Image (cartoon, helix red, strand yellow):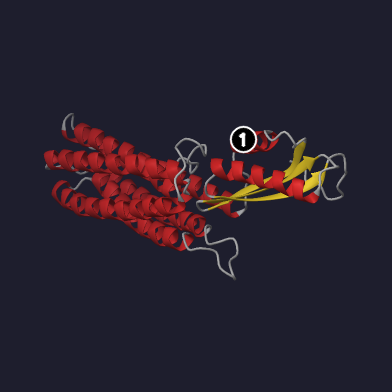
Amino acid sequence: MPITTDPGPADTEKPIDRARAERLMRLATYAAVAVAGSLVAVKFAAWVLTDSVSILSTLIDSMLDVAASVVNLLAVRHALQPADEQYRFGYGKAESLAGLAQAGFISGSAIFLLIESGERLYSPTAISNTPVGYAVMGVAIVATLALVTFQKYVARRTRSVAISADSAHYTMDILVNVSVIVSLFLASGPGWTLADPLFAIAIAVYILRGAYEVGRDAFMVLMDRELPEDDREKIRQLALAHPKVLGIHDLRTRQSGPDVFIQLHLELPGDLTLNAAHAVADVVIDSVEAAFPRAEVLVHEDPTGVKESRAFED
């Protein structure tokens, strides 16, 4: 479950072209579905052999991972479609809609786990075949760690909200799998049979927390929340770097999937010709788009000192 969907500052990696970014995003979604599907199969076998409710919890989580990753795959494919006459700003918000769907899936699995674990608290059951459980959890940790490493790389290069959310989701799965190993040891070694359902309850609570966070972050993108202040300050500095730019105002930003939309007003000397002002704006746009490769930048030129009746406080 996602802890955050912020892939980090725009310049954490060297910018890449749109075609390569789209290939990486598609590959990341296919990898997530493949890994989650494989883990469902091995965890199901481990649950049948051990009858551990902790392993059942990770099995259910992996089944939800498959559903969430399939939704992510479809959403990313949809979000990468180019803008058309009906959707002039593109389809990027499909990623955030997928995030809301993930939150619903994840919440349902957590509630189921709470019910199942509550029953096991009243009827503790001994864990069998723990070596199988250890082996399966070890495989799950290695496979998930490889997936997360690749997803984080893709998220840094593309700024994809969906890939970043999925990466944080699977990062939490690694912690869950480690906790299952601990619960198996406590239940089979010292004989603390209650450790199994108690760990499952803790996992369920953590899952609910993650569901809330991914839903909140997706909602913020859908509501056109501003980019992080570090990014906004970088945009200001890039604009002010031009010697003819005396100031900026009405800076507005938002993100839609991997795409970023930036608009601002440049304050220029009043004696500049229209052609000269246009040339300054082009230089500013080019510098901002170089720093934010997936950005669409809209600039309005204002003569300095002129008060606007509809200025936006930024």
User: Which residue is at the far bottom?
Assistant: 86
Name the quadrant of the N terminus: top left
Eyeballing the image, is 94 above or below 148? Answer: below
Q: Residue at x 21, y 49 (%)?
A: 43
Q: Amino acid at mark 1?
A: Lys
Q: Residue at x 33, y 53 (%)?
A: 27
Eyeballing the image, is 284 above or below 192? Answer: below
- In this view of the protein, which residue sits in the foreground, 286 or 230? 286
What secondary structure is found at the residue carrying circle 1? helix
- In this view of the protein, which residue sits in the foreground, 94 or 194? 94
| Residue 93 placement (x, y as % from top left) | 53, 58
Name the quadrant of the C terminus: top right
The part of the image, by quadrant, that contains residue 152 is top left
Left or right: 57 with respect to 16? left
| Residue 293 placement (x, y as % from top left) | 52, 46
Name the residue beneath numbered marker 1. 234
The residue carrying pointer 1 sits among few (fewer than 14), some (14 to 19) or many (20 or more) residues within 10 Å by Cα, namely some
Q: Residue at x 59, y 70 (%)?
A: 85
- In this view of the protein, which residue sits in the foreground, 40 or 182? 40
Work out whether residue 166 can be spotted. Answer: yes
| Residue 58 placement (x, y as % from top left) | 28, 47
Left or right: 284 with respect to 118? right
